Amino acid sequence: MAIIFDGHNDSLTREDHDRFAAGREGGHLDLPRMAAAGMRGGIFAVFIRNPETADYRPVQSNRPGGAGPAPELDHSFAAAASSAAAGRLLALERGGHVRVARAICDVDAAAESGPLAAVLHLEGAEAIDAGLEALDLWYAAGLRSLGPVWSRPNAFGHGVRFRYPSTPDIGPGLTEAGKALARRCAELGIVFDLAHMNEAGFWDAAALEAAPLVVSHAGAHAVCPNSRNLTDAQIDAVGATGGLVGIVFAPAFLRPDGKNQSAGTPLSLIVQHARHVADRIGVGHVALGSDFDGTEVPDALGDVTGLPRLLDEFATHGFSAAEIEAIAWGNWRRTLARCWGEAG
């Protein structure tokens, strides 16, 4: 069975996180199910809900106007809530259940027989002050991946609103603080993740030439014209920098009709998005970016235990064993090493 590294999940935001190590009912991820599926590493997102509502996702809309972005979060609230969520992962590490991956050697150890490698990620940098003083503290705590925005504005840029059909060319790009954040992340060795970034912000990040362009969970706009997906020009730019696209599992970003419909969404659609990216920039720039516990996934997948079935689907559609190993593990490993360095 192939070992798997998944580029994005929201499990730290779930209410039943305290049962993550022993196993829990529902959701997509826990340690026993991950072990059964061969998932040995992943990027664990800290995402903060909007405090004024019970829900934290704007309504997905299939109308051209789409749904508006959530309001900007208060920094002090986001910092406190993010710290609490990150503490859940650090508690799992103290319990010996996972290893927070601070260097590529931690990922390599997980590939052998060590604890699961968990990369700490901020999905939206609201917990970072515009002066970036908090960034070094987060790095010391283990942060190794950061998305400057979710689908709402903040001090660093403007997340792309969820629209179908629509291009990702919605709103202005990175602010000056956002550009400074990108440069500082490159200096520290923190992945600067462009998932949820609008097109203007994507090109602002590309122009900095600070690091490989990484998009942890998205699809191909040519297959599904959702604003969250990457245009061919964006995909080409990722390839030109030696970067990576993690293919998301959310039906709304997979299906050509844009419907957020788990039933009847075949696993072959995930493969189709991967094939489109691979045909443009090479298999070496394609990986998995599920968004487990943050979205619906195809019923044919179910949860993390469906990942071996997904890899079988890749084989059915002509991907070689070596290509599947790269998509499942090797491409994320190489990209993290480029951002973090091989030492450590």
Image: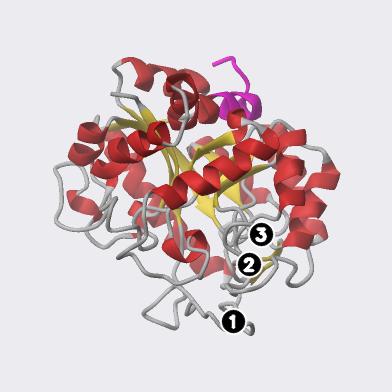
Position of residue 170 in the picture relative to residue 92 (left or right): right
Is residue 107 or residue 5 the one in the foreground? 5
Residue 75 x/y as whole percent? 58, 67
In the rendered image, which residue does mark 3 sit on?
197
Element type at marker 3?
Answer: loop
Element type at marker 2?
Answer: loop
- Residue neighbourhood size for the residue with mark 2, other residues' Cα within 10 Å, grouped as few (<14), some (14–19), many (≥20): many
**Of the residues under marks 2 and 1, which one precedes in the sequence?**
1
Residue 342 x/y as whole percent? 59, 16
Cα separation between marks 2 and 3: 10 Å
Is residue 100 or residue 269 the one in the foreground? 269
The kind of residue tagged 3 is Met
Q: Any magenta on residue 291? A: no
In the rendered image, which residue does mark 1 sit on?
66
Q: Which residues are magenta?
A: 334-344
Query: Can residue 174 be seen at all in this image of the molecule?
Result: no
Above or below residue 211? Residue 84 is below
Residue at the image point whose x is 48% and y is 39% from the top: 141
Above or below residue 324? Residue 256 is below
In the rendered image, which residue does mark 2 sit on?
227
Cα separation between marks 2 and 1: 9 Å
The kind of residue tagged 2 is Ser
| Residue 276 occupies quadrant | top right
